[in-house]
Image (cartoon, rainbow, N blue to C red):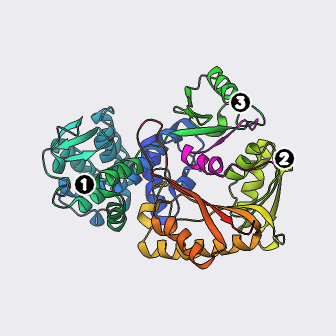
């Protein structure tokens, strides 16, 4: 993939989508290859927009072109996907710009016939669009692809399955989510709540900053950001800041000074629920990239004894680098997982590897790689880590177990399995947060506080 020739956001997006599939890499990794920050920001929106909605986009392509997507060459298909994404999900973008640039790019990398096919599919899609944005309440469900909780793109033909006759199939197709996952949500949360989870899983997630309270305040951070022209607002009751269209995070005012950490408000709730004490010794067992580790330091005023570890050397470097930027290196002892010898901690924070079903908006590719069998395997790993945490906490100590998942098998049921085999521990409290697209939108996750009764 050559990086010398300047590219537009649409071209970058199509290239990244094709390369990520070809090389089996996450799209975010490939986007880092492009130094043009302004273009990269726009390209990032296009790439992740396509990935979040890829199954629905492919359904539109097949309905409008009458050709299966598997029969369309990968490079051509991704050009069309970017175009259809903008036509369906970006109603403010001019139609001619979408189509013309897609065709021009196709001419440059394929042949006249393939470019003609790109033009035909996009124009046929346009012919079948009745209204690029209208109220979902007024739109016929089978002909309307949802964009937000309130709006959708209405077609002249039926695109989606019958919502009333087959809600599971409808939600799976409309929101590009695995059928088995939608079924699990319907069984657990019911139709209305599942619909909200689906919208939240496909939203463009807000960016939240947690101020490093050892160096600034939430008000001080807001003042600094606004002085640089960054639009932002304080999240009431959370001492966090939501920033609008921040561009490259590393270029934001205060980043190099270690004044903040990027963290979703639902994830920040884990340490808030734990309420760590300055006199505690705390082990962060799966610490990288260090977001919660730094939060532990800040929450305890830098006075707690904190040890952080992770299983991979590369992740340990990420952890050290993050703590260094925030000026917190001296407050944390970082050790390799296999070198961890000490036991008897007052608290073990265990943020386990999980299915990420609570953060699908932020990690959209997960939906295409996750299987029901994989979740079962993760639950076994999580239980093993809980057993390890049990050996590391002192009598009377606390285990804080957390995930970015909303699956019961990884959360409440998993904790129940642990408690069933360890009657010396009890559940003090647990909190499940479902992802939301409303107001201060946020991801989903779970936290449980488990106490050793020996104390």
Q: How crowded is mark 3: few (under 14 residues within 10 Å), some or many (20 or more)?
A: some
Q: Distance between the residues labelled 3 and 2?
A: 19 Å
Q: Does the magenta stretch include residue 318?
A: no
Residue drawn at x 60%, y 45% is 263
- Residue beneath disc 3: 217
Most distant residue in the top direction: 227
Q: How far apart are marks 1 and 3 (CA)?
A: 49 Å
| Quadrant of the snapshot with the C terminus | bottom right
Q: How crowded is mark 2: few (under 14 residues within 10 Å), some or many (20 or more)?
A: some
Dot 1 or dot 3, earlier in sequence = 1
Element under disc 2: loop
Dot 3 or dot 2, earlier in sequence = 3
Q: Residues within 10 Å of mark 1 (few under 14, many from 20)?
A: many
Q: Is residue 258 magenta?
A: yes
- Give the percent coordinates (x, y) of residue 246: 56, 34
**Horizontally, is 151 left or right of 16 in the view?**
left
When the figure is inspected, residue 163 is found, relative to residue 229, above or below; the finding is below
Q: How far apart are marks 1 and 2 (CA)?
A: 58 Å
Which numbered tag is attached to residue 303? 2
Residue range (magenta): 256-278
**Horizontally, is 129 left or right of 147 in the view?**
left
């Amino acid at each position: 993939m050559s990086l010398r020739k300047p590219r537009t956001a649409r071209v970058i997006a199509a290239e990244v989508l094709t390369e990520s599939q070809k090389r089996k890499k996450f799209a975010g990794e490939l986007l880092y290859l492009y130094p043009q920050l302004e273009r990269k920001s726009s390209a990032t929106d296009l790439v992740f927009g396509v990935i979040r909605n890829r199954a629905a986009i492919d359904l539109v392509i097949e309905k409008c072109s009458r050709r299966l997507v598997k029969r369309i060459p990968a490079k051509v298909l991704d050009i069309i996907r970017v175009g259809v994404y903008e036509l369906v999900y970006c109603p403010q973008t001019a139609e001619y710009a979408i189509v013309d640039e897609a065709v021009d790019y196709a001419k440059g990398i394929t042949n006249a016939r393939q470019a003609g096919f790109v033009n035909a599919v996009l124009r046929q899609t346009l012919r079948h669009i009745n209204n690029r944005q209208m109220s979902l309440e007024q739109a016929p469900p089978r002909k309307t692809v949802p964009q937000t909780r309130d709006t959708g793109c209405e077609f002249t033909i039926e695109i989606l399955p019958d919502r009333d006759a087959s809600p599971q199939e409808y939600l799976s197709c409309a929101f590009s989510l695995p059928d088995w996952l939608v079924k699990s949500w319907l069984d657990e949360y019911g139709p209305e709540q599942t619909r909200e989870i689906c919208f939240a899983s496909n939203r463009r997630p807000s960016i939240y900053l947690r101020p490093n309270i050892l160096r600034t305040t939430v008000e001080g951070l807001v003042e600094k950001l606004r002085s640089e022209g960054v639009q932002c607002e304080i999240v009431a009751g959370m001492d966090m800041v939501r920033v609008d269209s921040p561009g490259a995070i590393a270029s934001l005012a205060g980043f190099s000074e270690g004044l903040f950490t990027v963290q979703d408000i639902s994830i920040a709730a884990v340490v808030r629920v734990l309420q760590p004490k300055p006199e505690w010794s705390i082990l962060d067992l799966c610490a990288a990239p260090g977001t919660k580790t730094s939060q532990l330091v800040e929450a305890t005023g830098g006075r707690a004894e904190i040890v952080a570890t992770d299983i991979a050397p590369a992740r340990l470097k990420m952890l050290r680098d993050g703590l260094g930027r925030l000026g917190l290196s001296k407050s944390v002892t970082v050790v390799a997982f296999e070198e961890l010898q000490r036991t008897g901690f007052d608290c073990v924070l265990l943020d386990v590897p999980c299915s990420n079903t609570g953060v699908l908006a932020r990690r959209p590719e997960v939906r295409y790689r996750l299987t029901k069998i994989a979740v079962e395997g993760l639950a076994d790993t999580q239980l093993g880590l809980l057993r390890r945490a049990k050996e590391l906490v002192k009598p009377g100590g606390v285990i804080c177990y957390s995930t970015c998942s909303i699956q019961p098998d990884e959360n409440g049921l998993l904790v129940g399995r642990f408690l069933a085999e360890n009657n010396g521990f009890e559940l003090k409290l647990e909190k499940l947060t479902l992802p939301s697209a409303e107001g201060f939108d946020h991801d989903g996750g779970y936290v449980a506080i488990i106490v050793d009764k020996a104390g």
